[in-house]
Image (cartoon, rainbow, N blue to C red):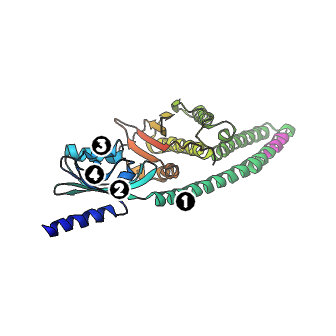
Amino acid sequence: MKNITEGLEFLYRLVENFPDGIIVFDIEGKVTLLNRVALDQFKAKGSLSDYLEQPVLNLMGNNIIGDKVRQCITSGRESFQYKAIELNGKYIDAFGKKISEGMLLFLYDVTKNVEAKNLTLVNLIKGQELERQRIAKEIHDGVGPNLSTIRLGIDTISAMATEKDLKQKLSSISSQIAEIAQDIRVISHDLMPSSILDFGIKSALENLITRIQSNTQITIDTQISIEDEHEFLNHTQSLNIYRITQEAIHNGIKHGDANKFEIYLNENENNFQLTINDNGLKEDNKNHDGIGLKNMRARVNSMNGALTAKSLKPNGFQVQAIFPIVKNNKSG
């Protein structure tokens, strides 16, 4: 009996001094063992003894981990793993392991790793945007004016020409140059949408949609509840929203021959949410690993958010980005 008692005391000390969260609960969902780290991770008040033999869901609240634990209690135990779950301002790797009389839950704090990774993504995206800006400026200040000068010279020659065939050919060349110049202006604007800088995200998206619909047979319905001057939406986030929308529309057209889109941009108490639905004829999720979706996911990750992409029934595709609202967030 003494050996058993000593063994239990050693186990309790080991769990209590473990650097990460540990929770053990039985088949009925009642806590049999936990440590202070786990309480802190869930911001639970009181002592450890307050939670022993109590429902584990009372401790967890409403979050992804709690939802999975609830499923394990009601629908049968199964091991699970979640990476970088946002929990009370921290990022947690959660591992649930089925044991003989219940479940063992490990909660590893990976906040520093996630923040370091996200900082790298932020810097990478900033570098990409600076290069886009440089190229856009070169096009706007160099190629555009040069084409205008060439067209002006051709129009001058055309006015001096007397042969009808020559005038028609020169006029045709002038028209082609005008079309190229217009295409270049569109490319320049896509590379660096000035409407974000000048006005804000709502105006920028409306401008993007207007340009797409005026040049194609594509229909885009929108529901944008976020105004241009949002208190907690900075320039970098606005640009990410713009790029994700731009990429999702491009992917829908390219991979699914979509001709109708629905764009929703709104917020709740804690998050911004961007959803783009299309009517493309995708039959599988193979393009989830494409460069476009990887770029979108990287942008969302850089804002400590999450991106999901899935096929819709009977056809269509959905991209949804959710990222947290950060107060006092007007830099960047």
Closer to the observer: label 3 or label 1?
3
Q: Crowding at label 1, few (<14), some or many (≥20) Cα neighbours within 10 Å? A: few
Q: Amino acid at mark 3?
A: Asn
Q: Amino acid at mark 1?
A: Thr
Q: Is residue 156 magenta?
A: yes
Quadrant occupied by the N terminus: bottom left
Q: Amino acid at mark 4?
A: Ser
Could you say whether the residue bearing mark 1 is in a helix, strand or loop? Answer: helix
The answer to the question of whether label 3 and label 1 lie on touching residues, with beta carbons closer than 8 A, is no
Is 16 placed left or right of 328 in the picture? left
Residue on which the image places disc 4: 49
Gap between marks 4 and 2 measured at Cα: 10 Å
- Per the picture, the main secondary structure of the magenta-coloured stretch is helix
Sequence-wise, the earlier of marks 3 and 1 is 3
Sequence-wise, the earlier of marks 4 and 3 is 4
Q: Crowding at label 2, few (<14), some or many (≥20) Cα neighbours within 10 Å? A: many
Could you say whether the residue bearing mark 4 is in a helix, strand or loop? Answer: helix
Could you say whether the residue bearing mark 2 is in a helix, strand or loop? Answer: helix
Gap between marks 4 and 3 measured at Cα: 14 Å
Q: Amino acid at mark 2?
A: Arg
